[in-house]
Image (cartoon, rainbow, N blue to C red):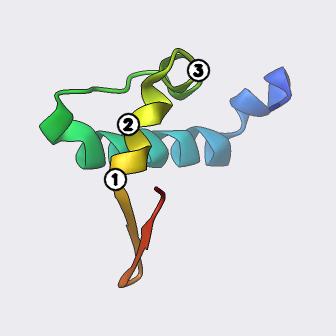
Amino acid sequence: MIEPRSFENPSLQKLIRVLIDWVNDELHHYRIIVQDVEEDLYDGQVHIFSDVPVRADGFEINLA
């Protein structure tokens, strides 16, 4: 859980924007667009990640 006043921190806002951009890049072929991380992932969209390999710094991790 993130403290509500933490959302005022520019670094957290930037991190959230980067996360949203990454999720949307990974899920675009499912025609899923995340606009609010907390809301969209909470309402069940997170199940789609079982089919998405995570790629970071040249490594690939399958979440399934």
Q: Earlier in the sequence, mark 3 or mark 1?
A: 3
Above or below for 54 versus 51: below
Mark 3–mark 2 Cα distance, whole angstroms, equals 12 Å
Q: Of 59 and 34, which appears nearest the observer?
A: 59
Tell me how far mark 3 sits from mark 1, CA to CA: 17 Å
What's the residue type where badge 2 is placed? Ile
- Asked if 38 appears above or below 52 in the picture, the reply is above
Q: CA distance from mark 2 to mark 1?
A: 7 Å
Q: Position of residue 13 (x, y in %)?
A: 58, 38
Tag 3 near tag 1, CB within 8 Å:
no
In this picture, residue 20 sits left or right of residue 5:
left
Question: Residue type at mark 1?
Answer: Val
Please give the residue where the numbered disc 3 appears in the rendered image.
42
Which of the labelled discs sits on residue 48, or is there none?
2
x, y percent for residue 15: 56, 48
In depth, the one of 55 and 10 nearer the eye is: 55
Of tags 3 and 1, the one toward the viewer is 1
Q: Secondary structure at mark 3?
A: helix
Would residue 24 appear left or right of 54 to someone viewing this image?
A: left
Residues under numbered marks 2 and 1 in contact, where contact means CB atoms less than 8 Å apart: yes
Query: Mark 3 or mark 2, which is nearer to you?
Result: 2
Residue 32's label in the rendered image is: none
Q: Quadrant of the N terminus?
A: top right
Q: Residue at x 79, y 33 (%)?
A: 6
Q: Secondary structure at mark 2?
A: helix
Q: Residue 25: x and y, percent?
A: 25, 47
In the orientation shown, which residue stands out farthest toward the bottom? 58
Residue sitting at x 54%, y 40% = 16
Residue 52's disc is 1
Disc 1 element? loop
- Determine which quarter of the picture holds residue 62: bottom left
* Number of numbered tags placed on the structure image: 3
